[in-house]
Amino acid sequence: MQIRDIQKLTGYSPGTISRVLNGKAKAIKISDKAIQLILQTAEAHHYRPNILARSLRIKKTMTVGLLVSDILNPFFGRIAARVEQLLRDHGYVTILCNTNEDPEDEQASLQLLLDRQVDGIIIAPVAKKLWPALNGNGIKPVILLDRMTSRNGMPCVASDHTRAAEKMTAELIRSGCRRIAYFGGKKDSYINEMRSKGYRKAHLEYGIEPQSELVFFEGYGIDDGTRMVKRLFDNELECDGVFCVNNLVFLGMMGLLWDYEETIGKQLRIAAFDIGDYCALYNRPLISADQDTERIAQAAVCLLIGRISASFQEREKIILPIIVAKFEAGEPPKLIR
């Protein structure tokens, strides 16, 4: 059904029908009787607006691109679900792209979204440098999510990764750890850079030199965590604590950790990002730094909608605190200040 079909059934002009269907009837004082008849007729005949025609008219596609680096990571899954809901509340459809922590996939996804003429982009970037796909598209609103790049002036929403990593490592040291393995992601990535900075800073504050042979850079997936703990095995390296760069690395590590602990005859202290939901499953002390996915999603959508609607254009960088807590078996978590 089209507007002209509603016109035949109701007798009202296309302009009146269009204003009623777009929620603008009250502004031009269309009668309640007309509004009721038009809406009832549209509903009874399953009227759906012509999205393409509307996009051409308002010069917006009402779509937003969301690029995340790994949709299998529950952290990004939660953010993607919340961002989609918030954008839907604003009338936008979300096109989700998974870049697999691969700069080439990221570049291809960006080009796809630009070809689709999305109204804006929210991206958790893999690459740290300017994306070629955005050259010549500088007016397209882009919000960085969780990570930053070298592109100046681009608004972003991120967590205070360095401070959280520093607090986690300091707590490991206070619990008696002196040889703490660092299970990191890709060496040149923003997340790894910020979190390893906090790891090293805590060591130096306590007068301890980080052991280079205990620092590993593999990646952010479960298999990467397994490979890193296996390297401890294979190289017969001694350590008393482990810092995991994210939740998937932690899960991969835990698969082999008990075997390693049995070999060395002691239980290690473990700290990891975004493992709060898993801590109750393990009968051991754990330290978790959990990011606020709700606030991250809300802030990113707020910044994007503001730029799409041109209600504000100032540069903005939002850094959110991360809750760091210590979990002991059978006890409620204790916040680490």
Image: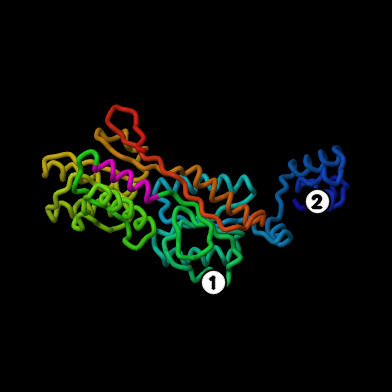
Residue placed most toward the observer, 31 or 278: 278
Q: Quadrant of residue 62?
A: bottom right
User: What secondary structure is found at the residue carrying circle 2?
Assistant: helix
Position above or below: 107 against 97: below
Q: In this view, does 333 lie above or below 113?
A: above
Above or below residue 273? Residue 187 is: below
Q: x, y percentage for residue 331?
A: 31, 27
Mark toward the viewer: 1 or 2: 1
> Which residue is painted at 44% across and 44% down in the image?
321
| Mark-to-mark CA distance, 1 and 2 | 45 Å
Pinpoint residue 237: horizontal percent, then vertical percent: 14, 52
The answer to which quarter of the image holds residue 39 is top right
**Crowd tier of the residue under label 1, counting other residues whose Cα lies within 10 Å: few below 14, some 14–19, many 20 or above:** few
Q: In which quarter of the image is the C terminus?
A: top left
Q: Residue 5 carries which label?
A: 2
Is residue 166 one of those drawn in magenta?
A: yes
Task: Specify whether 261 is left or right of 129.
Answer: left
The disc label shown at residue 135, or none:
1
Range shown magenta: 161-173
Q: What's the magenta bit mostly, secondary-structure-wise?
A: helix
Question: Which residue is at a point 75% across and 48% down the rendered structure image?
Answer: 22
Kind of element beneath mark 1: loop
Q: Residue 293 carries which label?
A: none
Question: Does the magenta segment cover residue 310?
Answer: no
Which residue type carries mark 1?
Asn
Q: Which of marks 1 and 2 is nearer the N terminus?
A: 2
